[in-house]
Image (tube, coloured by chain):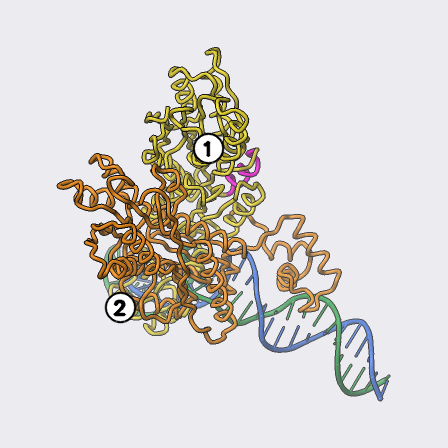
Chain colours: A orange, B yellow, C green, D blue
Amino acid sequence: MLNKTTLAAISERTGYSVSTVSRVLSGNAEKYRISQSAVERVTREARRCGYRPNLVAQSLRTRQSQTVGLVVPGIDNPFFATLSSIVIAQLDARGYHTLLADSRESEEEERAALEMFQDRGVDGIIAVPVASSPEFHEEVGRNVPLVLIDRYFQKTSLSYVCTDNYAGAYMAAKYLADKGYKRILAIQGVPASMPNRERVRGFLDALNGRGVESKVVGDAFSVENGNREALAAFAGNPRAYDAVFAFSATILLGTISALRKLGITEGKDVGVISYDNNGFLDFMNPPVSRVEQPLREAGKIAVDTLFSLMEAHHSGLPLPAPVQQLVQPTLVIRESC
Amino acid sequence: MLNKTTLAAISERTGYSVSTVSRVLSGNAEKYRISQSAVERVTREARRCGYRPNLVAQSLRTRQSQTVGLVVPGIDNPFFATLSSIVIAQLDARGYHTLLADSRESEEEERAALEMFQDRGVDGIIAVPVASSPEFHEEVGRNVPLVLIDRYFQKTSLSYVCTDNYAGAYMAAKYLADKGYKRILAIQGVPASMPNRERVRGFLDALNGRGVESKVVGDAFSVENGNREALAAFAGNPRAYDAVFAFSATILLGTISALRKLGITEGKDVGVISYDNNGFLDFMNPPVSRVEQPLREAGKIAVDTLFSLMEAHHSGLPLPAPVQQLVQPTLVIRESC
DNA sequence: CAGTTTTGCGCAAACGATTGCGCGAGGTTA
DNA sequence: TAACCTCGCGCAATCGTTTGCGCAAAACTG
């Protein structure tokens, strides 16, 4: 920061006090009845030397940072990359900046990120939580506006916006069953996460009493997990299942890779359906059926909610009732099942 | 921030001055010869009330923020999402936090981001520049350590690390020509960007004098651009070209989509090759040949370079000579050409 | 013209940390 | 006993803003 143009400098050069300069440059001139001439003199000098306020000092003094913290379990996962990009764009549009942290599915790193956010005085936090219980998040939420997205906790006072994972998985499983598939393998993501639990529940409920064999395996929203589980499931018997439900697009890629290695043709030998859409599912062969999540909508709601919390927080109002919303996914059928 | 545990609070409760408390808690106890008993008393109280330093205040005083600014032209582009995730992970590993901004290919937004970074006193900046000339970046680089990644400027004193786009495109084009393709269409990304210009140059050079017709069209690293240009090129005549070189994976998706709509089978009717790899190219049908960039390596070099700049900057040393490095891409051949 | 209001602005205290300098008490040396 | 050194710590300035309060001069009132 060679930005040595401080209020004090302008004050010296214009002859006005630091206070006056501050009031002019922060747009509070009339509020404090600064004369027209002073305003002009100061503004001109500020423009001349390219004054830019030191945001750190500003933030220290006002306890506002125009910054929001965003923590996700893995930015390398295209799903969270997309989600992040949506949230960041939304924040940007409102003039807010983003501190981005990656918890890598670790509770500990998540805690560290949330604490760091507080230490830096962010104005609000958007989190895809990885913790198994809500206590810590709730504590944080008492200090700074916080909204959860994509993942959430069962009974919590926190605001969240997620997609209806139960409904999504239910639709997909029901479709498979209606199509006549009889032995369906679900490859799940992080088991403890709410979206995953809801998907499992939806999956099993949809199949219940329909004479369909089913199994749930796996433990991560990753390509590797999809690959490993598909290999394990089909290695002994290529006909072990007649359909696979991948709980994420990454899992799907791993699965497809495994099937091909085993000489199994997806869509023909075994039906395949996925969760999410990262833009390429339509380009695979065959194009992959899937449950698409309205991420843009969820992101918008999350940011809107955060801002209403932030407004209340800022003006010392009581917190508005938590917004806890599930948005509906859509089933997109292609040729893979 | 309900974090009312300040140095002053601990000072009051322990009877030691704020100075002493500060020195103990910032680990400078022996440097300032604080007694063992004071250290213990203060440490215990700090632990008891869960003291955490206010990073904003710290940052104001020390002019260090443990933060690096990262600006990319579009986080929704999987390429930049991946790149960001790599850089963020690297920074994280070194205890640094990331302010992420999206310039959306706009010079103006890029400027705003770079200025915002400075106003917030980041310790360093990593940028994928979109500006057409280096002046502004160089000016910024004089104030705060800055390294460019992926894109760069021709003659500049700034450090950068990029992949050798000339070599990459050359390899790909040469491969196509060797295979006997005679009419090759290149669909490019942002024309003014260095990677794109280098790719065009490599593409044309490789084809030069080999009796191959070639054309370069397009203007963005996006699915839409790939789609539009492929439609335009093949709509009138499905045999207009016998091969397409997509300058990014996003462009490729758009292209494939267009070809299929026109009833053209990629890999059979027309050879296809792409730049980048976002993990799914192997899963398309046919799997897509491509030029892969060693992003992880580039990210690591960029961050290493940034830290050496930051160290010099911090200790007031003269700036080390700029690191300007091109890392080599690899040609990965599959069945699409 | 005295009394009141308005106008225009500055003083100084925050915000929460860091750090150069110095000072008194106790110990050492000659 | 005087001169000096070391220990252990506190004073106060500083980083760059914001803002409550108050004050002098100008303007207005009667």
Q: How many marks?
A: 2
Q: Position of residue A300 (x, y in %)?
A: 48, 58
Q: For mark 2, give the secondary structure.
A: helix
Image quadrant holding the C terminus of chain A, namely top left
Q: Which chain does the residue under circle 1 lie in?
A: B
Quadrant position of residue B21: bottom left
Residue designated by label 2? B44
Q: Amino acid at mark 1?
A: Thr
Q: Which mark is residue A110?
A: none
Callout in the foreground (1, 2): 1
Q: Position of residue A59 (x, y in %)?
A: 50, 61
Query: Residues under labels 1 and 2: Cα distance?
Result: 64 Å
Residue designated by label 1? B255
Identify which residue, A268 or A218, lies in the foreground: A268
Please give the range of residues in magenta: B133-143
Q: Is residue B296 magenta?
A: no
Q: Is residue B139 magenta?
A: yes
Q: Amino acid at mark 2?
A: Arg
Nearest to N terminus: mark 1 or mark 2: 2
